[in-house]
Amino acid sequence: MTDQQLRQSGGNPSGRPEDYGVPQPPEIEKQWTFSTLQKLGVPLLILIPLLALLGLFGESSAAATETGNTFAVEVSYPSRYRYNMLSPLTVSIENRSDQVVPTVTVSFGQDYISQFSNVSFTPEPDEVTGEAYYVRFDDLQPGEVRLVQVELQADRYWRHNGSVAVAPGDADDAPDVVIEVSTLVYP
């Protein structure tokens, strides 16, 4: 090698670092090491999207049906939904008796309804007390079906429990049918 070529290569005739006397790094076997928290966290990070794909975090509804001496009542309500979403609670009341029922009172527990905001009833409640919202119907014919719909916007997190009661007569009369409802609101 000529002097000019030696200068161009930086003074190293072969151009390899080991010719300078610099030690090479040792061969290290690659190892995956996880702390206990990482061993738990990584599967959880994988599990959350899988549960979302399977619909666990989506909105779901439930329906409950009960028949009393006078009425057959079906309540469909949100069983699980997200904060600030709107969802209906619908009550269907059928007169199963052979007689006209002069007054029907549907009551919605205040402990349940107060957990939601922007609550709107169709038809509007006739009376609101510290215990319940009362919707009344007059002259329910045999076999006739009437509906009450309540739009609920989730305002508070976690589980909310309450009841819907249907009574022949006024709010003070004993209910013919009582149906329990439960809704889970999550972030």
Image (tube, rainbow, N blue to C red):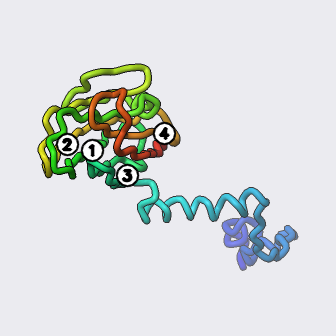
* Label 2 sits on residue: 147
Q: Could you tell me the amino acid type at mark 4?
A: His
The reply to whether dot 2 and dot 4 touch (C-beta < 8 Å) is no
The reply to whether dot 4 and dot 3 touch (C-beta < 8 Å) is no
What is the secondary structure assignment of the residue under circle 3?
A: loop
Rendered view: 87 above or below 4? above
**Marks 4 and 3, the one that precedes in the sequence:** 3
Q: CA distance from mark 2 to mark 3?
A: 23 Å
Q: Could you tell me the amino acid type at mark 2?
A: Leu
Q: Residue at x 58, y 59 (%)?
A: 45
**Marks 2 and 4, the one that precedes in the sequence:** 2
Q: CA distance from mark 2 to mark 4?
A: 23 Å
**Marks 1 and 4, the one that precedes in the sequence:** 1
Q: Could you tell me the amino acid type at mark 1?
A: Val
Q: Using the image as rendered, state which of residue 60 and residue 66 is in the foreground.
A: 66
Q: Could you tell me the amino acid type at mark 3?
A: Glu
* Label 4 sits on residue: 160
User: Residue 136: which disc?
Assistant: none
Q: Residues within 10 Å of mark 3 (few under 14, many from 20)?
A: some
* Label 3 sits on residue: 59
Front tag of 4 and 3: 4
User: Residue 91: which disc?
Assistant: 1
Q: CA distance from mark 4 to mark 3?
A: 15 Å
**Marks 2 and 3, the one that precedes in the sequence:** 3
The reply to whether dot 1 and dot 4 touch (C-beta < 8 Å) is no
Q: Residues within 10 Å of mark 1 (few under 14, many from 20)?
A: many
The reply to whether dot 2 and dot 3 touch (C-beta < 8 Å) is no
Rendered view: 167 above or below 171? below
Q: Using the image as rendered, state which of residue 155 and residue 73 is in the foreground.
A: 73
Q: Residue at x 40, y 36 (%)?
A: 154
Q: Residue at x 56, y 64 (%)?
A: 46
